Image: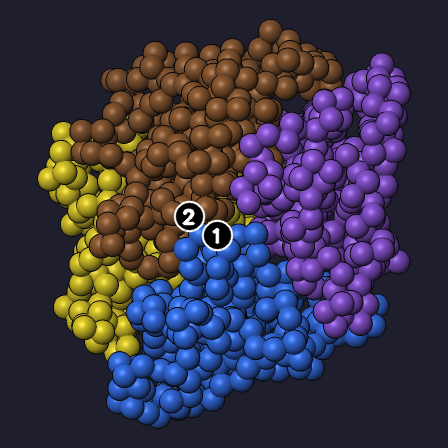
Chain colours: A brown, B purple, C blue, D yellow
Amino acid sequence: MPLNETQQKLVGDNAGRFSGLRALFVNTTLTPTKRGRSHTENLMDDSIAIMRGCGVEVDYLRAADHRIAFGVQPDMREEGAEVDDWPEIYWPKVKAADILVIGTPIWLGEESSICRVIIERLYAHSAQRNDKGQYVFYGKAGGAIITGNEDGIKHVSMSVLFALQHVGYTIPPQADCGWIGEVGPGPSYGDDMENGARAGHDSMFTRRNLTFMSFNLMHMAKMLKDNEGLPAVGNTVTEWS
Amino acid sequence: MPLNETQQKLVGDNAGRFSGLRALFVNTTLTPTKRGRSHTENLMDDSIAIMRGCGVEVDYLRAADHRIAFGVQPDMREEGAEVDDWPEIYWPKVKAADILVIGTPIWLGEESSICRVIIERLYAHSAQRNDKGQYVFYGKAGGAIITGNEDGIKHVSMSVLFALQHVGYTIPPQADCGWIGEVGPGPSYGDDMENGARAGHDSMFTRRNLTFMSFNLMHMAKMLKDNEGLPAVGNTVTEWS
Amino acid sequence: MPLNETQQKLVGDNAGRFSGLRALFVNTTLTPTKRGRSHTENLMDDSIAIMRGCGVEVDYLRAADHRIAFGVQPDMREEGAEVDDWPEIYWPKVKAADILVIGTPIWLGEESSICRVIIERLYAHSAQRNDKGQYVFYGKAGGAIITGNEDGIKHVSMSVLFALQHVGYTIPPQADCGWIGEVGPGPSYGDDMENGARAGHDSMFTRRNLTFMSFNLMHMAKMLKDNEGLPAVGNTVTEWS
Amino acid sequence: MPLNETQQKLVGDNAGRFSGLRALFVNTTLTPTKRGRSHTENLMDDSIAIMRGCGVEVDYLRAADHRIAFGVQPDMREEGAEVDDWPEIYWPKVKAADILVIGTPIWLGEESSICRVIIERLYAHSAQRNDKGQYVFYGKAGGAIITGNEDGIKHVSMSVLFALQHVGYTIPPQADCGWIGEVGPGPSYGDDMENGARAGHDSMFTRRNLTFMSFNLMHMAKMLKDNEGLPAVGNTVTEWS
């Protein structure tokens, strides 16, 4: 949806404030782009617009467009996978990004299977270290964007944010947002409704949470960058060998 | 358990480094102190020792020793509760602390009921704001310590860390730690074993994770304090009125 | 809410069909009856009405009206608790009931703290056996009713139904139901709305799921009763001693 | 592992008792058969051996050996997927089976991504009905087998069993089992250990739970079959049209 007045003012007042930062948004909807817009993408676009407006360099990947192998190694082709788009298409962008935002739909109250593929592949890099000997994801900030037509934003967020902090991301306050309608069948985020409006676009709650999330991720990523990440004291594997 | 050599060295090298910070550890075991030591307390003690050794002023509360009312208002006596130890014993310490660590046992794969009482009572303060108009928990760092005799550290951690970030805490990398033994009945953390050792005390995994968690909480709390919290831009309710 | 035409017809066609069965509904809202109706109770009432209409003898308890001790023993007074309403008020009804339905509100995406108290106290009886040497909850059916003003029916249901099957209940298909509105602040189930209606009362989805749940619990409890429970073959502890 | 004496006696005493039943075991490990045995398979084999010993006709599928498309429709080739092994290899077996057991490893405290693919594909059939107008999975029993090297059996079980009951399976008591070792790195189920034994094979807890699960699934499936499923009263969509 287009940013509203408040969001536009925030972006205008902070144009360029976060230049130098890079963000990666990964959409884990089950459908590839050729099958049309995704509801999750629709919501992610707002956060992307805010970040870009504030000077962040943003990449966007829709995982269903690629063939990412199942597994928990950095390059699954070395383990026999025929195709694996992770090492060349995903990993360089993940590594370069100061901010990672994972977007996912909800199925049976959980994140999508493709979302778990992404998490498993992030986890696959947990043996790698940054220059200071910390886990390679230290010094980065992570968030989550969730849509569905009924129920499960918080549950999905628990799982995604936990995974991100577990591998080394910092989770700033209120680092998730999402939209669901009333319980039961109904429109998903951005669907055209009978009254001509688009589902969820009038939710100030979702709009505000998305804005808080976007700014908190930028604030945290910038603070970490300005401080050269977390000090490598008490949190490196080498101290234990 | 006593800190081991690595932990002692880390503390020695960083004595006073984090002075000026305050931490609160809340143990949500189901048993009051008069019924003896808690396994969770046993593990929390190590993190407390590390933080104190580095100059942090630490408070410890065992929730089963008090009578905290059920409810989602800051003072449940105003809602008819006979007794409510939250407003006078807990809230001032929560508010003053830069770091909050919640410790909990695992029952049926979940945090304790008392742990949920604490989370509900934190949530009760979500209408309050700090000086900058942000949620009152902004600028603080949160973590979790979990013990049980079988299974559920990650699941419990997901729930506790999610709640903390949701109300405004920042979650640094690897902000949880815990100990469980092999699946099934068996000793809980710190129990005397037949061989004279105490269960879990030889787990380098738990010891290291606890150390990472303790330092990351201190690093994050200090970074937030040195930067006067997160900038109040894009994350205050007043921007939306 | 009053049963609708479809529900009334189902009840009318099956009046007395399930006589001989007993059900217990436990509401774990955080507020006692003296503070007014609970949203969860409002929804539970419909399932109670259906079961009573079909001949089931139904008990209802609102846990916030009693003082149930924290702990994982059958009678916490023996462990030093001052008061414990579980052994005399709850346990006899739990034991007598063929069907147990736990109702809970959602707080921060999870069941209430009081809901976890109930689960911990059920778990406390896991050392007890029925006449056939099985866990004492074998041969009973369990379900869950969940309300909240935003998000979490499925997550809460996962946790509650898991706990019930873990201690010995059978979970029939679609053994949960609930109501939540669109994400964000808003009316809870049964709240008066501006248009004169009551929130959620027009949700055919919730009404239907509640009906499916109610009937499936009765079908399963009756089938188990008619078959004298699950055969005591391959599922008793004595076979392993 | 080979069945132990107790398990062998139970099987011997009940040879043929459950003939006429069919079961399907789906292993959702991330690795295909060509990369070797899976730890989860190792544990699943015991349940398979018990069921076969009791007369059940058992199928076993390892999902990583096939290419099951992402999506929530019964045949994703109709939605543009290049390959989809679900409709021809999986669905006929799922439909024919009275018992479905999903086996999964644990990654970051959750079921595998492939496990979620299977759940999404089961969910895709929720618009289908059986002869009585009920969801197509009514009258079947479901269970879960979980392995990992550290933590998460209960959490994963919550999610898998919830999904199964949600689409229509009945969950008998204690319908899950699993093995994990002490927290932290270490052997996975069935790994060779220094002392010559294989990890987890001496766990009476796991062995007993697996046996309880296997028998309860057979008892429940047989009871449902003998009663021609759940009566189609109060649980069909047609009653609501």
Provide the secondary structure element on which disc 1 rests: loop
Asked if the residue at tag 2 contacts the one at tag 1, i.e. Cβ–Cβ closer than 8 Å, the answer is yes
Apparent side of residue A222 relative to residue C99 in the rendered image (left or right)? right
Q: Can you see residue D89?
A: no
Apparent side of residue A200 relative to residue A36 in the rendered image (left or right)? right
Which residue is farthest left?
Answer: D78
The image shows residue A241, relative to residue C54, as above or below, that is above
Pointer 1 residue:
C184
> What type is the residue that disc 2 sits on?
Ser
Subunit under mark 1: C
Res D98 → quadrant: bottom left
Residue positioned 58% across, 35% down in the render = B235
- The quadrant the N terminus of chain A occupies is top left
* Relative image position of residue A52 (x, y in whole percent): 43, 20
Pointer 2 residue:
A203
Subunit under mark 2: A
* Relative image position of residue C118 (x, y in whole percent): 62, 67
The image shows residue D63, relative to residue D3, as above or below, that is above
> How far is mark 1 from mark 2, CA to CA?
8 Å
Res B66 → quadrant: bottom right
Q: Can you see residue B201?
A: yes
